[in-house]
Amino acid sequence: MQETLAYSLPGAADALPRPDPLAALLADLNRDRPPLARLRHDATIAFGPAMRVERFVLGNGLKVLVLVDPSAPVICLQTWFGVGSRHERIGKTGIAHLFEHLMFGETESVAHGAFDRMLEEAGAETNAATFLDWTYYHTNLPKDALELTLRLEAERMARLVLRDPQVSSEKEVVANERRQRVEDDVDGAVSELLYKEAFRKHAYGWPTIGWMEDIKGFTTEDCVEFYRTYYAPNNAALVLVGDVALDQALRGVQDHYGAQEPSRLPVEDVCPEPPQTEERRAEVTKPTATHKVAIGYRSPALGDFDHAPLVLLNEILFAGRSSRVHRALVQEQEIASEVRGWVGSFRDPALYDIYLSARGEHTGEELLAALEPLLEAVRRAPVTEAELDRAKARVELSVLQGLETVAGKAEQIGFYETVLGDPAALFERLAAYRRTTVGDLLRVARRYLVSSARTVIHVIPDGSSDVDDDAGAESEEAS
């Protein structure tokens, strides 16, 4: 009996509740705070083998994700909003991207141009990006500039000045950007046409930058409505990575964001894309020296089981000089100067983009004819284990290299939190790559590389260009 009692005592002691340091911290932070400013700890999430993300939620719905990394006295602060071009409606395309510009303008207490100047004087650098599923704002800063950065970010989330002069000025900036990046750029115009032809119902069919007619037609009232709807704490994730003092950072979040009211977010109304049963083709004439062809095969959503295998298959087909397509079309047959492929990483099913640029007088039809046996080979028989192992190693190296900086970590946390609801989903992706088999690649090749469900855009030279596409491609490849 004594032995049993002696054996039980250590277990009983271990079972005693241990003080929760986060609970004590939050009790202190929340003391005398109004409901909107009260923080709760939502989860501790492993971020790789040695790091963790602490997710907090403010009373107004703002998610705060913190990864403490004291390896250097710097911090990356990113604000991810759950709004991109997919959330727009016909006739108002491009407004999500317009806001990427407007958000660097005047606020109620910060003059036009002062936002960037104040951060630069503090040693910080800032930027932003918009895409189909998200918009985010990015600042790299020394640790002693955190309070200033939080104040400025909170200010523009809630008190942006939207009047006719500001809106008209930024509309013209975006219209010029569209002219340069789409209308006067072959690749930009072809990519836009590819998605327009491939998506007849889903919002992925219109470009993030918007149609020119819509850009010119935005009113100040349109912008105010969009801002009040989507630029709200309950539609945002604030990501902090680096040499962060947790108590100081959370107190700053409460001070600067705690008075903001949540918005009434609309129910997302995105139409699923119907199955494509026939190949779609379009032809455009552009000022380019050689023929080009863009192909869009259907691809799975980022969270789909098939996404990781399709990424690895693309690596085998298109990644680098040793890839199957580069060896065949560029090195052996010498009919292409450039080949590339990319699997869309979006919330909904999208496209597996393939781009081929002809060498000399070769045509897009020749490129397609030469590509088809290479695709048929991966549909007919498994790739080799050696090919798959090399693809896994390259993809994993690329992923891990992207995590070397605080900015790289913050971007992955914010992206996966916004698109998949899991800030550490990148490591699930790594696990998915590692367990992928040659049989998985055979399955996805047969499921997605289907000619009847693809869209093809042929680019024909208009005869006006004297650019040596081959030389440019070779120079780019070498660099």
Image (spheres, rainbow, N blue to C red):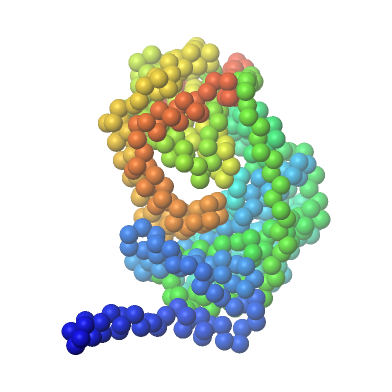
Q: Residue at x 46, y 38 (%)?
A: 306
| Residue 284 picture location, percent across and down | 64, 21
| Residue 61 picture location, percent across and down | 62, 68
Q: Nearer the viewer, residue 343 or 107?
A: 343
Q: Is residue 399 above or below residue 64?
A: above
Q: Residue at x 69, y 50 (%)?
A: 268
Q: Nearer the viewer, residue 207 or 267?
A: 267
Q: Is residue 391 above or below residue 474?
A: below
Q: Is residue 452 above or below residue 29?
A: above
Quick check: 342 left or right of 161? left
- Quadrant where the image shows the C terminus: top left
Q: Residue at x 57, y 86 (%)?
A: 31
Question: Can residue 146 be spotted in the picture?
Answer: yes
Q: Is residue 229 above or below residue 343?
A: below
Residue 174 placement: quadrant: top right
Quick check: 254 left or right of 354? right
Quick check: 95 left or right of 334? right
Question: Can residue 110 be spotted in the picture?
Answer: no
